[in-house]
Image (cartoon, grey):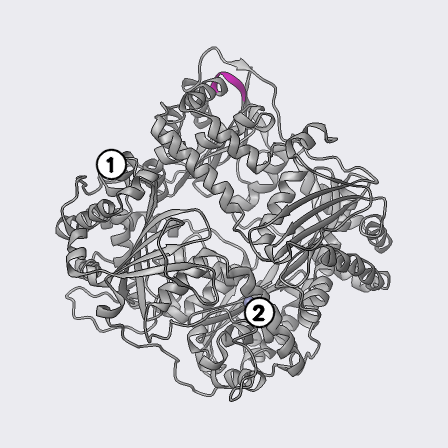
Amino acid sequence: MKKLFLASAISAALFAAGCAQTDTSTNANSISTAPVAADQVIKSPNDQRQYRTVTLENQLQILLVSDPDTEKSAASLSVDVGLLHDPMTQQGMAHYLEHMLFLGTEKYPDTNGYSEFMSSNGGSQNAYTWLDITNYMFKVNNDAYDEGLDRFSDFFKAPMLYPEYVDKERNAVNAEWSMRREMDFFGQFKLGRALLGEHPANRFLIGNLETLSDKENSKLHEETVKFYNQYYSANIMKVAMLSNRSLDEMEALARKHFASVENDNIENPEVDEQLNFADVGGKLIHYVPNEDVKQLKLEFLIANNQDQFAVKPNRYVTYLLGSEMPGTPAATLKEAGLISSLNASASPDFYENYGVLSIDFELTDAGMEQREEIVRVMMDYIKQVKSEGVDEKYSKEIRTSLQNRFRFLEKGDEFSYVSSLAEAMQNYPAEYVISAPYEFQRFNPDAINNVLDQLTPERLRIWYISQQEPSDSELKFYDGKYKVVELSEQQLQQYQQPADYAVSLPKVNELLPESFAIRDNASFAKPKIVTQEPGLEVWQYPSQKFADQPRGILTVNINNEAPITDIKSHVLAALWRDLYSLNTSALDTEASIAGMNLSLANGVGMTLTVSGFTDKQPELLNRALSALAFNVEPRSFKQAVDRYIRAINNKGQQFPLYQSFDAYGSLIREGSFAEDELIKTAQSLSAADLEQFMSALLSNNTIRAFAFGNYNQPDIDKAVAQVKTNLPDDRNITDYRYAKFYKPQQQSAIVLRKDLDVADVGLVEVHMHPEPGFAPQAAGTVLQSHFRTAAFDTLRTEEQLAYAVGTFAPTLDRYTGLGLYIQTPVKNVADMHERFNRFKQEYWQQLKNMSVDKFEQLKSSTLITLNEPPKNLNEEVAPILSDWALQRFDFDSKQALIQAVEALTLEQLKAFYQATLLNPEAARISVQLRGEKFAEQPFADIPNMTVIESLSDFHQTMPKQ
Ligand SMILES: [Zn+2]
């Protein structure tokens, strides 16, 4: 749970132009940077929901969203306090308190009560903590909203903060830290802050057993209570609520539950420490990461300008710096073979009152040799942007792009929506919480120049990131070595010398949509074939729910089984995809500005997908198809192989839990190969092999395409003609093929074992039900939330074995199972396996005694969730494409599951558990990843087990469905 902590970290790093501060700054510029006054919440014309803002007597500001169509209600509460406000004697406190609030309140004292309530009512809950925000959120079935709010709001009135759990929960935080400490993102973020001198951002964020502990003058429990009392005040909280009720009813609910949250009228805890650029800037940082990467990063420290969101200076600057158009640094350096990607982004509150504007390069080996030259190219280009680039024509392009996106803004999940609204309310005027990321009210050259003027050597930190860097220091609390070099005036000037490569500003975008016309389509009961010729089949289905949206998804599979049966073809397909995406990055960027996406995936053959606004899709498809086959330069081929091998090796640095699921996925379905064999194969290949493979695949295949959304027959005919033009006339037609699943065998266990380069253990254990069909799948679907809550309560809250622990009900094509997973820093594989085994029996005691009422509640909650209408095109098409890929042309899997859930009885639910986790005969799948910390300790033995030594041998011989 609380995995949003990570999500938040990554989004803070990657998604730049966004959040802003509410204070309206007084700017002396002639053109205002302030947003125009608005008297109500600005929403997309596409958004039928109603909004209202209310400020309660206790100064708590609440945003209400009424959506009569929703099946789920949700709420989120953010507090304007975070990691920067931790007491130095208890670092990690804000985050730790976030964990503690889930563990019981005066009115609902049971530590497990909240999660139990949520899982019984089709709900979910989470929270995250970042520099200056702690944000809590839940969603639940509509009929449970009142009680959900009652339980949730009690967090902010009377949490128990039990001393016993204060001590226990330290271990969950410690496990969370253990999970993240080896991640390079966190190490680099830590170092970036450590070099900020006395600034409050220079501290430990997550907390662990060492920092969160009793010390002579600082007792953990006392400090926890004190922190809560000091900062949890209604006047710095914001609430977003969404439900199917009317605004008046929601306002009544808001008052009922939040009016009594205490208001201490505290001062907004702002950070305003100033940086001394003479100390913190002008540095070269050598960083040695865990992953084998070759990166260069130019990090400029900029003043926080979030209050200028209405004129988007950061967006404007990064748009030009990151452009992939011909002549720009991205295009020029790629062409020269020095880089494989360039990304410019700004995060104006990255260090709270300071932000960063960052230019990130992925380098090739040749690029590693020429890092100074790359810096010079970028500095040259920045000069050009300053002198000629502040031009209204680019701002028109950016504005049109943002306006189009806002005009057709799609709905998302209620949970994420309230969460993002409650966060945005801390940053923007309430009227702008939805539209702020899309506002571009006027071209403001002064605001843009102000950002450009800060891109100076004294505010610059240059990062050289690779395993070959020199180092003289080690990070505390994180894995990472580094060396910091002060750049002298002379060295800085070196970087400013004219570059050897000439670069220029981009031309304007040609793909922006001009028409949003909607296609007229006859009614479709279900998807159907609209074009069929030998070796080519096109399916069509217009959206049933969003027929008024000018969008569509067109996917073209050039089907050929070689990449899943032959390791050489498998590797070549991956290299093809890599070089294709490098070759088409300019097209891809142009498309994405125009509200479209382009991707080429390797799987069973190659799959090209274009999506987004349909107006200019034919042009995009045409350009995408004509780029499909290309001459392969030996130099770029070698660079692609290098990236391929490093990506495989770097998988070993991921969270053990991710690695476990990755390994699980590779085991249960054909088409995967052992990593060392993939590497060996990649090393043996040449550019000529790839050219040969491309031509073989394009000459031997069957084409299957699916058009979902705003297309009509002429559109499809045009697409078909384009596809055919780009394929040889004398194609040899092959049979359609998809990757088959393992067919579970009674009395057998397949076990995948691996030693890791990271510390913790990752374990996934599944028992498959012996019978295929929707009845077992229905039982697994109904049971999993209850089972998960029990596992979380026992294995995390009570026993503190892990931060990440859970259960799932996986399907292997027609078969369903039940399983447990964990990443643990405290138990070895065999002991954890043993603990899982006992837990399977312990849970049976709970399940055996489940009442009919409880069962009916779980069942009706599951049905509400399954029957939720799709909220956007992607949600609508997902189950359809999944049936399509598995050749289930009745397209009724979802409906069949719903019917099976309706028919399910309590006895059948129990029988399902007995037939899986209690059944010694059940087919078992076990993934055992042994962390470095436990390398000397045993794996787990399972009756009837076969330890898989070679994935490809196993896939060749395994029984398939
Ligand atoms: Zn956490």
User: In the visual, does 525 lie left or right of 288?
Assistant: right
Quadrant holding ligand 1?
bottom right
Whole-percent x, y for residue 51 in the image: 46, 65
* Residue 201 position (above or below residue 756): below
Mark 1 — residue? Answer: 326
Q: CB of mark 1 within 8 Å of CB of mark 2?
A: no
Who's the residue at 27% across and 60% down the image? 485
User: In the visual, does 857 lie left or right of 252?
Assistant: right
Indicate the amino acid at tag 1.
Answer: Pro
Whole-percent x, y for residue 635 in the image: 34, 29
Mark 2 — residue? Answer: 173
Q: Nearer the viewer, mark 1 or mark 2?
A: 2
Whole-percent x, y for residue 639 in the image: 38, 34
Q: Nearer the viewer, residue 666 or 281?
A: 281
Q: Nearer the viewer, residue 521 or 813?
A: 813
Does residue 706 show up? no
Label 2 CB-ligand 1 distance < 8 A:
yes
